[in-house]
Amino acid sequence: MTMCAVERSGAVADYIPELTRVAPDGYGLSLCMHDGHVYSHGDSAASFTIQSIAKALTYAMVLTRLGPREVDRRIGVEPSGEAFNEISVDRARRPKNPMINAGAITAASLLLPQVRDLDDGAVDAAFDELVAFYSACAGRRLTLDEAVYRSEARTGARNRAIAYMLDSFGGMGAEPEAALDLYLRQCSLRVTTDDLAVIGCTLATGGVNPRTGRQVVSPEVAQRVLSVMTTCGMYDGAGDWVSSVGLPAKSGVGGGILAILPGQLGIGVYSPRLDAHGNSVRGIETCRHLSTDLGLHMF
Ligand code: DON
């Protein structure tokens, strides 16, 4: 099959060594409708690591546990206009939003016991709860990619620096190493585009998984998560994305994009070649086409 320029442009993430092992031209697309029907195309059953798409789900978890008022005290909701791995904080030294690494590491810290001397096993226990929540959103049990997790843990100087910097600002209750560990584990969960589409539809339909019928988050939490995905989910590419695609979305350096048409459907797309913002080139192009051809733009 011949490939067009968009399909060949971009490069797989290489700052996490294990991610360089993926097939660069893998491609999958899935749509989950509000009745739970999933339409799939390409490698829709091939799994890849969820990476930053996890940030939307962990944000939903902390909103559910602590309520928006407490979460807002710790993490802002403003677009940063900077790369995902910048230490973007506001005047109160809060991470600017939960979709960048700084906000997501803070969110992970809020899922841990807010003490300094954590028991052995505290991160394991928090991770078990996190996996249970993500799995409820996907409608099947998700598993960890140990190799990617270990690879990023070994090479994660930038995220470690962010965690310690935020800790020095007093923004994290839990120990920075524990928060970082939980964050890295959540990034290394494996998903398929079918999973992303179901997760997206769960958020699209007020928090009810369309395949299991289970209310996984409240409509208020789903609404907040979609709002912040709209303004911050594609990082410093968010303005271009919202203008041209017009859907709440979240990308990951594994090559996945989760996009959502509120009230209607969830879209999962996978293609690991990334642009300069860390977003999938072909994933964006696919969503642009879907938005135009099916009239999905929200505005
Ligand atoms: O923390 C990191 O750098 C990665 N585990 C996740 C970054 C990411 O997915 C950025 N998104 N496109």
Image (spheres, helix red, strand yellow):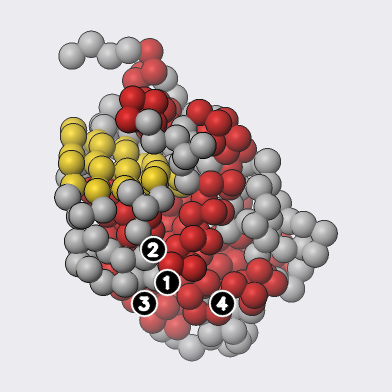
Give the mark nearer the N terminus: 2 vs 4.
Answer: 4
Secondary structure of the residue carrying numbered label 4: loop
Q: Which mark is residue 218?
A: 1
Would you name the residue on which mark 2 appears?
206
Secondary structure of the residue carrying numbered label 3: helix
The amino acid at mark 1 is Ser
Give the mark nearer the N terminus: 3 vs 2.
Answer: 3
Q: Quadrant of residue 164?
A: bottom right
Q: Which mark is residue 67?
A: 4
The amino acid at mark 2 is Gly
The amino acid at mark 3 is Glu
Would you name the residue on which mark 3 appears?
129
Secondary structure of the residue carrying numbered label 2: loop
Residue 233 located left or right of residue 140: right
Residue 5, relative to residue 90: is it above or below? Answer: above
Determine contact: label 3, label 2, CB under 8 Å: no
